[in-house]
């Protein structure tokens, strides 16, 4: 229907060929926005390589395409991609995407906390996080000493700190991230439409104890997700931090490009009182 015809129908009513009359046309939309500057910069960069953009894909959606199995996408699951500068999330149900969100916290912020808390360089903080990082303490953490070069000191000036101190720096930031995820899920308006399943992926999800922390704070079943097996994908690209890139390959093959209608109100109360409440809601 042309725009002018739609506006006329909305104000004065629309009559279809069968003689049925309606006054309001409604639609459920899922809008993903992005900064114009970032998109123009990306297009300019690719044009210098003599390439064009065929499609734009939300990063959490791509991660979901590569890490979720068919039953999870059908029954409902939430993908949490814990990247470097951001943590993104996507809710799938009935085989397709329902909701996306992005949070301004990720693995880079954990590295920065370590560098500031232990007075070491960014490079060594990243190394400490990758080799010894965890969110759960053990009885041996107070006795295990880690070498930490100090910023501005000579190379031979290396401090020794217990592993428990490293964990005490990492844990608060991960708790903050999952609190933000929980709040975003609660305010998304989906309820339990996304199921009771959470799949963690991305580089920061590989820290020890992250799965258990997510299950406790989100009160959902949690598993760690890696890109599903793809023919020709090298072993080096099967880690969790390659989930988004693998998902782009899935999208290029047509996976996730077809959208279907979803009835978010399917779980209505069937009792007489519930039917009465639904009757009132539909007419108010």
Image: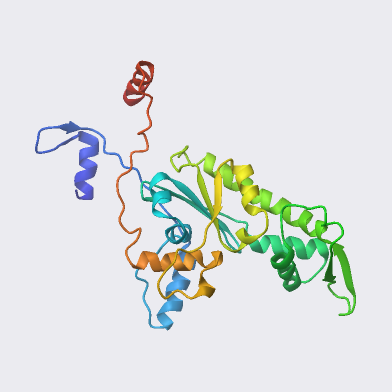
Residue 129 in picture, x, y percent from top left: 71, 65
Vertical relation: 29 (above or below) 256: above
For residue 208, side relative to residue 264 (left or right): right
Vertical relation: 211 (above or below) 218: below
Vertical relation: 269 (above or below) 74: above
Task: Work out whether residue 49 or residue 150 is closer to the camera in this orientation and state it.
Answer: 150
Residue 68 in picture, x, y percent from top left: 45, 55
For residue 226, side relative to residue 120 (left or right): left
Q: In which quarter of the image is the C terminus?
A: top left
- Could you tell me which residue is drawn at 86 percent across and 56 percent down? 142
Q: Residue furthest front?
A: 140
Residue 125 in picture, x, y percent from top left: 75, 68
Residue 154 in picture, x, y percent from top left: 89, 79
Task: Work out whether residue 174 or residue 29 is closer to the camera in this orientation and state it.
Answer: 174
Among the 4 quarters of the image, the one containing residue 18: top left
- Could you tell me which residue is drawn at 20 percent across and 34 percent down? 12
Task: Work out whether residue 276 or residue 238 is closer to the camera in this orientation and state it.
Answer: 238
- Could you tell me which residue is drawn at 35 percent across and 18 percent down? 276
Task: Work out whether residue 189 or residue 8 is closer to the camera in this orientation and state it.
Answer: 189
């Amino acid at each position: 229907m042309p725009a002018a015809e739609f506006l006329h129908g909305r104000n004065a009513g629309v009559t279809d060929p069968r003689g049925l009359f309606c006054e309001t046309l409604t639609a459920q939309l899922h809008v993903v926005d992005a900064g114009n500057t970032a998109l123009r910069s990306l297009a300019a960069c690719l044009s210098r390589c003599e390439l064009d953009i065929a499609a734009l894909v939300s990063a959490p959606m791509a991660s979901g395409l590569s890490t979720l199995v068919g039953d999870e996408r059908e029954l409902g699951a939430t993908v949490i991609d814990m990247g470097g500068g951001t943590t993104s999330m996507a809710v799938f149900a009935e085989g397709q995407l329902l909701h996306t969100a992005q949070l301004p916290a990720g693995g880079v912020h954990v590295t920065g906390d370590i560098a500031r808390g232990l007075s070491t360089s960014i490079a060594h903080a990243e190394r400490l996080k990758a080799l010894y990082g965890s969110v759960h303490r053990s009885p041996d953490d107070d006795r295990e000493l880690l070498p930490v070069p100090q910023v501005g000191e000579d190379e031979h000036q290396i401090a020794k700190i217990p592993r428990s101190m490293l964990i005490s720096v990492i844990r608060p930031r991960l708790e903050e991230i999952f609190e933000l995820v929980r709040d975003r899920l609660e305010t998304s308006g989906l309820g339990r439409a996304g199921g009771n399943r959470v799949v963690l992926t991305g580089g920061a999800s590989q820290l020890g104890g992250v799965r258990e922390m997510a299950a406790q704070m989100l009160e959902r079943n949690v598993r760690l997700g890696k890109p599903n097996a793809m023919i020709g994908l090298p072993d080096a690209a099967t880690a969790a931090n390659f989930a988004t890139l693998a998902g782009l390959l899935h999208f290029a093959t047509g996976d996730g490009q077809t959208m279907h209608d979803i009835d978010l109100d399917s779980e209505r109360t069937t009792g007489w009182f519930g039917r009465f409440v639904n009757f009132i809601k539909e007419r108010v």
